[in-house]
Amino acid sequence: MCDEQTLKDWAKYLKDHPPISRRKFGVMSAGAGLAAALPTVADAQFQPITTSSVEITTPDGVADCYLAHPPDGSHAGVIVWPDILGLRPAFMDMGRRLAAEGYSVLTVNPFYRGSRAPVVPEGASFNDPEVRDTVFPLAGQLNAETHFTDARAFVDFLDSQGSVDTSRKIGTTGYCMGGPMIMRTAAARPDRIGAAASFHGGGLASDADDSPHLLIPDMAADFLIAIAANDDESDPDAKVILRESFDAAGLSAEIEVYEGAQHGWCPPDSAVYLEAQAERAWSRLLALFDNALA
């Protein structure tokens, strides 16, 4: 989870691994777009996709989200929960990239209760105190119950779309604070969620009464838990608790600590983006979906 320890770890890491400059990021994001900078998988770059901004009614309001899917046919649905900086161009590009692999992808704005997306400027960094002052109050509006109610609304929305094959299970991915969200999504709709992947997710297994790992017996999905090396150093027991919990429930779960990767290494606009390990995590996500959402 993004916190003061994350900032300390990043400061140490960035001394030897300078991030992409905001100016360079702005150039990448213009013209051909950030998607051109994303590494391609197989022939995904040749697959056309259809995109749209959508609004989804939930018990707490209207969520502005982003839908991407192949232009023809129906496909397995996927819900993407962004990290603490929310729905933004980098995650829209990630949604399009996944859609190009043959999925109907809903990338959500988890902060819709307080603000429409994007909630921070393009190229914003969690290192910036003003950015943290913006996102922390929005994140504070969320809790275990909102995760459940939002998950149900987003699953129902996908199932109402012609681009979604309802005979196939739905997948979900979450980054940073999205980690607990994918687990609660799997518990909220075990009848529909067949695969769930957490990338540098925080708070998956804790002493809290509402710790996500306690819900594992209520789930029916295959899992991918990709853990940042510095997160594992801070909480080495979490992966053990998760392994024991998944095994006890009889659920398939790939749990791995990604060597050299800092919390936040997957989104391409992150200050600690690590391409080689991000691509490895991406390939494992595609393998998970290929096996569990067939």
Image (tube, helix red, strand yellow):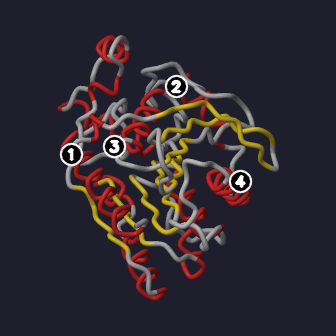
Q: Crowdedness of circle 3 by 10 Å Cα count: few (<14), some, many (20+)?
A: many
Task: Check disc 4 and report the residue beneath it.
Answer: 153
Q: Residue at x 70, y 36 (%)?
A: 55
Q: Crowdedness of circle 4 by 10 Å Cα count: few (<14), some, many (20+)?
A: some
Circle 4 SS class = helix
Circle 2 SS class = helix
* Foreground of the two, 103 or 31: 103
Q: Residue 80, how many percent across, how many down?
A: 51, 48
* Distance in Å between CA atoms under marks 4 and 3: 26 Å
Q: Which one is in front in this view, the residue at disc 3 or the one at disc 1?
A: 1
Q: Crowdedness of circle 1 by 10 Å Cα count: few (<14), some, many (20+)?
A: few
Q: Crowdedness of circle 2 by 10 Å Cα count: few (<14), some, many (20+)?
A: few
Circle 1 SS class = loop
Q: Residue 166, how many percent across, how many down?
A: 58, 62
* Foreground of the two, 228 or 230: 228
Is 219 placed above or below 182 here? below
Return the disc, 4 or 1, that comes first in the chain's sequence.
1
* Distance in Å between CA atoms under marks 4 and 1: 33 Å
Task: Check disc 2 and report the residue beneath it.
Answer: 129
Is 88 placed above or below 176 here? above
Q: Which one is in front in this view, the residue at disc 2 or the one at disc 4?
A: 4
Position of 66 compared to 176: left or right?
right
* Three-letter amino acid code of the residue under disc 3: Cys
Return the disc, 2 or 1, that comes first in the chain's sequence.
1
Q: Are marks 3 and 1 in contact (CB under 8 Å)?
A: no
